[in-house]
Amino acid sequence: MPRLRSPRHIRIFLASPGDVLEERKAARELLLRLEREPLVRGDFTIEVVSWDDPDGPVPMLATLTPQQAVARALPRPSECDVTVAILWGRLGTPLEEQKPDGSPYLSGTEWEFEDARQARKPILLYRKTTTLPAPREDADEAERQRRNLERFFEQFKGPGGTLRGGFATYDTIEEFTRRLRTDVESLLPTLRQNDEVLPSDAGWLQRTRTKVRQWGAGRLLLILPLGLLVTVVAATAVGTFPKLAEGRNVPVLAYVVRYLLMVIATIIPLALLVVVWWWLGRKKPYQEG
């Protein structure tokens, strides 16, 4: 039977300050070209999300901060499949937006990075290691940017030199694009692995079931209504048993069934609570840089 497999649409968010514009341009061109290559074509379509897209730049409204304008016009990193963050000599301009601890975000790039991380989305982080040119801004601002950048990268270092996260370094644009290509090609199969191939004559019920399975909480929502239904039926049967048995010669088997239903009505709600607790607290797989 012929099988249909629609291309998986991938959104890739570019997060970086303005001192790596060449890398942003190279990344955008590479990713858009990648979807047309034989090993990717037909399986994936790639959408690059960036504020400086030449075909659809973000309108910078006078009534909004730059980060608010970007968040309003584009999908957030948490709504994309992969975030690509590129850093060199600066982290960017501080934001008015605050972190959960009340401190301001050091830049829009940090906000975008944290938005993707909180959503447990894959993040590919790259740091340029070539010597910085002479600063065009005052020395104090250049030093502040350097300190903020080092503070940002300190989060990947644990006690005793252990690593809490990874990032790649590069010197040239060519080295950066080669590494980015390899990393994205390695990620694509993991983004496709949960897709289910449907027969060409699949009905609406089968297609709906497939969508539910591919949805992160779909399986949980299939379990909960079924478990609640069984609990309600069992509890109702147990509650009405005395009235139905009144004045009748009830066989021993009926009492066995009643006690069995009592056990079911007690155990299933507890089991559902355990499942929900495990589901909400489980560690979702993701990759950081």
Image (cartoon, helix red, strand yellow):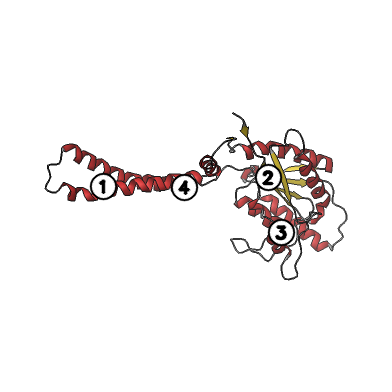
Q: Quadrant of the C terminus?
A: top right
Question: First in sequence: mark 3 or mark 2?
Answer: 2
Q: Label 2, label 4: how many angstroms apart (C-alpha)?
A: 25 Å
Kind of residue sitting beneath label 1: Ala
Q: Which of labels 2 and 1 is toward the front? A: 1
Question: First in sequence: mark 4 or mark 3?
Answer: 3
Q: Secondary structure at mark 4?
A: helix
Question: First in sequence: mark 2 or mark 1?
Answer: 2
Question: First in sequence: mark 1 or mark 3?
Answer: 3
Kind of residue sitting beneath label 3: Gly
Q: Which of labels 1 and 3 is toward the front? A: 1
In the image, 96 versus 266, the foreground residue is: 266
Q: Which mark is residue 108?
A: 3
Q: Which of labels 3 and 2 is toward the front? A: 2
Q: Is residue 156 left or right of residue 220?
A: right
Q: Which of labels 4 and 3 is toward the front? A: 4
Q: Is residue 63 above or below residue 158?
A: below
Q: Quadrant of the N terminus?
A: top right
Q: Name the residue carrying label 2.
A: 10
In the image, 66 versus 1, the foreground residue is: 1
Look at 43% across and 44% down and name the residue there.
223
Q: Is residue 264 left or right of residue 50?
A: left
Q: Label 2, label 1: how many angstroms apart (C-alpha)?
A: 50 Å
Q: Are marks 2 and 1 in contact (CB under 8 Å)?
A: no
Q: Position of residue 125 (x, y in %)?
A: 71, 46
Q: Label 3, label 2: how many angstroms apart (C-alpha)?
A: 23 Å
Q: Name the residue carrying label 4.
A: 221
Q: Name the residue carrying label 1.
A: 237
Circle 4: is it few (<14), some (14-19), or many (20+) Cα within 10 Å? few
Q: Secondary structure at mark 2?
A: strand
